[in-house]
Amino acid sequence: MEKLDKKLIQKRRIMKYFIEATYEIMEDEGIDMVTIRKVSDIAGYNSATLYNYFDNIDHLMAFASLKYLKSYADNLPKFTSTAKNPVEKYLKIWECFCFYSFQNPVLYHKIFFEEFGNSLNTSLKEYYEIFPNELTKEEAEEFNEMMLHHNIYDRTEASLEKCVREGYFSKDDIKSISEVSLLIYEGMLDRIISKMHKIEVEEAVTKTILHIKNSISFYLKKEVLAN
């Protein structure tokens, strides 16, 4: 078990206060209402202290945004429990991600597709050291490595690795499969955000998974998906 020194324990504790204060504002008032002053007041520290632990407000907000991944992470085991093979599991992982991200599309877009999300490249591992219980439970340990990848592109490729090992896809096709899946997902996410096409979450999930399923069928080296 990792033995933490007092300085590291204090650092994580103070960072936790700031992150939870930011999340509270995001939940109660919206992401656009987060300010350094509000966060500092709720956390009980001055703004100068905040800059000892975070580069800027976007860096802090990136940390706080990761709390919105908890429901997704917690429910991965349930969503994937019926999968009969790695390809079905890949689709179930996408189904879970779509279900939770489509309920909060603007924030998920910021996390995974905007400059805002670049702060996660150095934040993700540290976040889960501060909030270790927000990774998946022991029975879903296989997902933890995927959750710790720095960006959605790496995560998607990580979730395809078992498919390659078991001969469902060629390793040379992984980047193409990943890119097509992401293009389909981002397209639906943008459609939901734009509100030009009114669509319920369940319908959006169903359509997205159908398109991803059809797209990956082209790359399959053996038949595994039911029609």
Image (tube, helix red, strand yellow):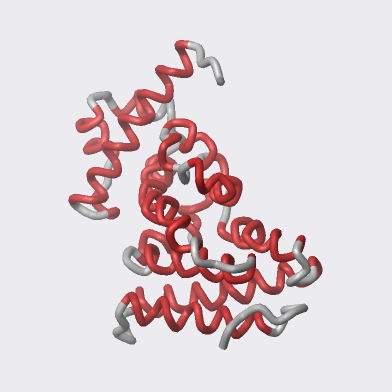
Can the viewer see residue 149?
Answer: no
55, 104: nearer the viewer: 104
Count of labels in the image: 0
Where does residue 73 sit, x and y in percent of width and height? 44, 52
Please determine whether, in this image, residue 211 is positioned above or below residue 135: below
Say which residue appears at 35% left-offset and 74% top-offset.
193
Q: Is residue 189 above or below residue 132?
A: below
Instruction: From the viewer's perspective, tell me whether residue 132 is left or right of residue 106.
Output: right
Q: Residue at x 77, y 78 (%)?
A: 221
In the rendering, at what x and y percent does residue 65 appear?
A: 38, 49
Which residue: 41% across, 42% down?
Answer: 134
Q: Quadrant of the C terminus?
A: bottom right
* 70 over 189 or under it: above or below: above
- Identify the residue at horizontal 63%, vertical 67% (top origin): 85
Q: Which image quadrant is residue 1 in? A: top right
The reply, left or right, for residue 44 in relation to residue 93 is left
Task: Decide which of 65, 138 is in the foreground and name it.
Answer: 138
**Residue 54 sits in quarter:** top left
Rendered view: 47 above or below 205: above
The location of residue 53, given as percent across then percent down, is 43, 28
The reply to whether residue 216 is in sight is: yes
Q: Is residue 88 left or right of residue 55?
A: right
- Picture quadrant where residue 218 is located: bottom right
Q: Position of residue 161 (x, y in %)?
A: 70, 59
